[in-house]
Image: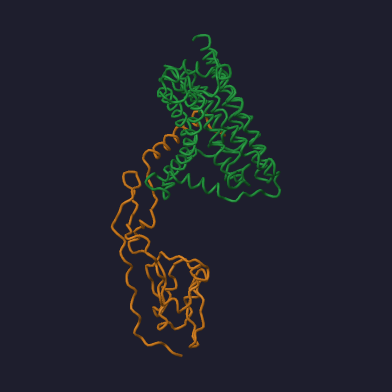
Chain colours: A orange, B green
Amino acid sequence: MAGQKLGEAIKAVLDVIGLGLKYTIKPERLTIYYPYEAPDYMGRIRGWIGLWTERCTSCMICARICPTNAIKMYLEKNGRRYPGIDYGRCIMCHYCIDACPTYALYPTEIRDFAFYKHEDMIYTPDMMRKPPQVPKLVPEVVKVVHEYRNGKVVKLRVGKLEEPKPLPPAPSVPVVES
Amino acid sequence: MGLPSWLLSPRLWDFLVDGVVSTLIILTIVWAERKIAARVQMRVGPFHVSPRLGGYLQLVADAIRFVMQEVIITADSYRVLFVALPPLFVALALTPSFLVPLSPHLALLSRPALHYGILMGIAILFYTFIMVVGIGWAVNNRFAYIGAAREALIITAYEIPVATAFADMFMIYKTIDPIEIVAKQMYIVGAIYNPAAFIVYIIGVAMATSRFPFEIADYEGDVATGPYSDFSSIFLALTYAGGIYIALFSYSLLGALVFLGGWAPITPGPWPADIWGNLAAAAFLLFKTFVLMLFFVFLRSVMPVARLDHALSFSWRWVLTLGVIATAIAATEYFVL
């Protein structure tokens, strides 16, 4: 219409109807049927963050580097401060893990965790010892990836989702007492 | 057959077939609209309610939800019209489908009234816009007000082209009787007699029932469903989620009769003798209606939304010109055929 020739407009309308018909008859779908399917991240997951308080030196670098100020340093009974993560704010960037000089914070692949209340999202140092329980909704989860081949998007099934890797063992270093 | 005579009344059967099949068609078309839009947008659409049926029962679930929801009448609204207009809207939108025959012998009206069935249907359908404007006024918030004003402007864009398209076809057939109109399309359908009128009809109906690209009065992104923005529960089901589709069904039924040849290749015998033939004719007509509706809802997945002034200028500049061309074609065929 506006600044467009009539022929171009008619051609555009016919083109878009043709394109729509093509996708209506031969759909290419991006949908992943969670929880029956899950995307295959090939190990590149940044998930829940664990903490071994034994290794923590209370340097507070994690709290300072956190881009969303999700980490709060809680005063524990032994007079030291340990980090606790608010998962309402955490964006799973794992900067805190990168910055931790003593490897007290460690990464996991636990990604599917949900909360009923906002209070549940705020993890204190004690809670960060034990990983959150992910309920098993279906007996087996199929891993899928999307590929673009021959001008079409196809969804490929690449095996079943394995059990999550076991967490690293607790450090044998003695608890740092002040 | 041993059935009592009142059970074989063509009026009863017309009423039942039209009522039941139109409900089924409208449910299916809403489902199809969501599925087609999902396919074009690389999604799946309704699925988890009845996965084996492709999510078809999602519509039933939605309907139950609409009926069970609390009815909220806002404090600022004009209560009488707020409650009265949605059922009236549905009634006005559905009436035209009862005025036209579904097969040569299956009709609710008898001959002298049936003669004017299509004409009455178009006239009644044009009145649904008053319901929409009235709903917008009764709801009384800013979105409803803007939506009602847009609807009141849009009627000027589609009323004359749609009426022109139908008048052109009446001119070609030299009659307004729906049964004779179908009889004249036995070999060539009306859309081929006068393609320009058919295009004008398509664009006009897309405007009248706010299909894309002319979903202007109740566009969700602009005016938050416009006149229906304060409706919830059964009122929303009657207007935004139902009434518009019922109007689309009636427009499509008239269009299938006039432009797509109605039950054309099927010529059933008289009613009580040839029940299956008549029902097959009705089924074929309703199938054509369904296909036409499918095209209208398909537009949602591929079209953008035009602005109000663009739609008005498009209608007055191009659609009306096309209507004049269609009239010229019709006048030629009036003297040639």
Who's the residue at 55% across and 39% down the image? B242
Would you identify the image quadrant in which residue A162 lies?
Answer: bottom left
- Taking the view exactly as shown, the residue that stands out farthest to the bottom is A178
Residue B55 vs A88, above or below: the answer is: above
Q: Nearer the viewer, residue B257 or A2?
A: B257
x and y percent of residue A126 in the render?
Answer: 45, 79
Q: Quadrant of the N terminus of chain A?
A: top right
Who's the residue at 52% across and 71% down the image? A119
Residue A50 vs B170, above or below: the answer is: below
Q: Nearer the viewer, residue B46 or A40?
A: B46
Who's the residue at 50% across and 69% down the image? A67
Q: As drawn, is B122 to the left or to the right of A87?
A: right
- Taking the view exactly as shown, the residue that stands out farthest to the left is A159
Who's the residue at 71% across and 43% down the image? B78
x and y percent of residue A88 in the render?
Answer: 51, 67
x and y percent of residue B236 in the render?
Answer: 58, 44
x and y percent of residue B233 in the render?
Answer: 58, 47
Would you identify the image quadrant in which residue B115 lies?
Answer: top right
Q: Nearer the viewer, residue A128 or B302?
A: A128
Count of marks placed on residues: 0
